[in-house]
Image (cartoon, grey):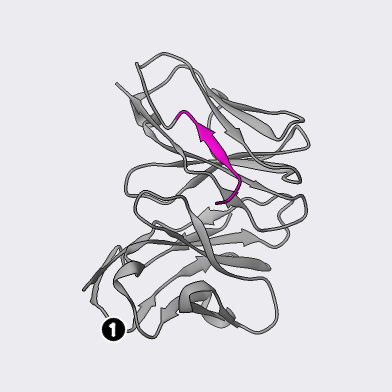
């Protein structure tokens, strides 16, 4: 167990809709990162939050946005869903200054 | 920007065979290196990591990896695999001067161990 949970487990949305994915970690995990893992590929970094501020972003458009809350929970929001957004979305949490991150089980998003 | 390549997409071995999975990265500066494993239906787990010091690092479940700076490589090895090692393995890099913990992953190697 990593102490990182994600909800929901699976989600089906229609192209053009908006989606919110959630992540919860344990006390001491000041950083949270989100990754997108398309089928058959490695995870790709979307962005990271540290103490509720965005602290780095990968090559993803602005319709991917996030929030981090003081209670060690986090959200990933995706607007105007596209078919290519279908993937497993992973949340990873860690302590600030540490390079070890703990991954959640992921949310599988299917866009039809 | 850094990138990671894993040479083998699929590997099939019999139990007790030796394993070596290749990983090469491209980045000119200081790097931290990781191997993660994803067992079927489970979340990504850290197998081992290299930050500095002895380039031969030992991880959990009998895995080890060797950092060869001149070859930009961090290959994963295990002398004798078991059926329970069937999983997908990911090499990842974090630039040492990165302000955050951004990990760049390779495409993964799917290992199947036949009993």
Q: Looking at the picture, how far across and down is residue B102, in whole percent?
A: 62, 50
The residue carrying mark 1 is B17
* Residue A6 painted magenta: yes
Callout 1: 10 Å neighbours few (<14), some, many (20+)? few
Q: Looking at the picture, how far across and down is residue A110, in whole percent?
A: 34, 28
Q: Quadrant of residue A59?
A: top right
Q: Quadrant of residue A69?
A: top right
Q: In this view of the protein, which residue sits in the foreground, B3 or A98?
A: A98
Q: Looking at the picture, how far across and down is residue A74, in whole percent?
A: 64, 31
Please tell me whether mark 1 sits on a helix, a strand or a loop: loop
Horizontal side of A31 relative to B60 (left or right) equals right
User: Which stretch did the figure color magenta?
Assistant: A1-8
Position of A57 relative to A68 (above/below)? below
Instruction: Look at the image and tell me in which quarter the C terminus of chain A lies.
Output: top left
Position of B67 relative to A88 (above/below)? below
* Residue B18 painted magenta: no
Tell me what residue is drawn at x 65 percent, y 58 percent.
A100
């Amino acid at each position: 167990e990593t102490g990182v949970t994600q909800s929901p487990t699976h989600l089906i949305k229609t192209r053009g809709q908006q989606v919110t994915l959630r992540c919860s970690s344990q006390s001491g995990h000041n950083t949270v990162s989100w990754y997108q893992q398309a089928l058959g590929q490695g995870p790709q970094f979307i962005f990271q939050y540290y103490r509720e501020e965005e602290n780095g972003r990968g090559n993803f458009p602005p319709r991917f946005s996030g929030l981090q809350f003081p209670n060690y929970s986090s959200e990933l929001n995706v607007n105007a869903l596209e078919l290519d957004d279908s993937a497993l979305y992973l949340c990873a949490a860690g302590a600030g200054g540490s390079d070890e991150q703990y991954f959640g089980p992921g949310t599988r998003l299917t866009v039809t | 920007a850094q990138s990671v390549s894993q040479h083998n997409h699929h590997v099939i071995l019999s139990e007790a065979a030796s394993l070596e999975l290749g990983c090469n990265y491209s980045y000119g500066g200081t790097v931290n290196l990781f191997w993660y494993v994803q067992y079927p239906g489970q979340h990504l787990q850290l197998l081992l990591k290299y930050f500095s010091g002895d380039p031969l690092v030992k991880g959990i479940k009998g895995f080890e990896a060797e950092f060869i700076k001149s070859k930009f490589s961090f290959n994963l090895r295990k002398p004798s695999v078991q059926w329970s090692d069937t999983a997908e393995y990911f090499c990842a890099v974090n630039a040492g001067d990165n302000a955050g913990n951004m990990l760049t992953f390779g495409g993964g190697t799917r290992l199947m161990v036949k009993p």
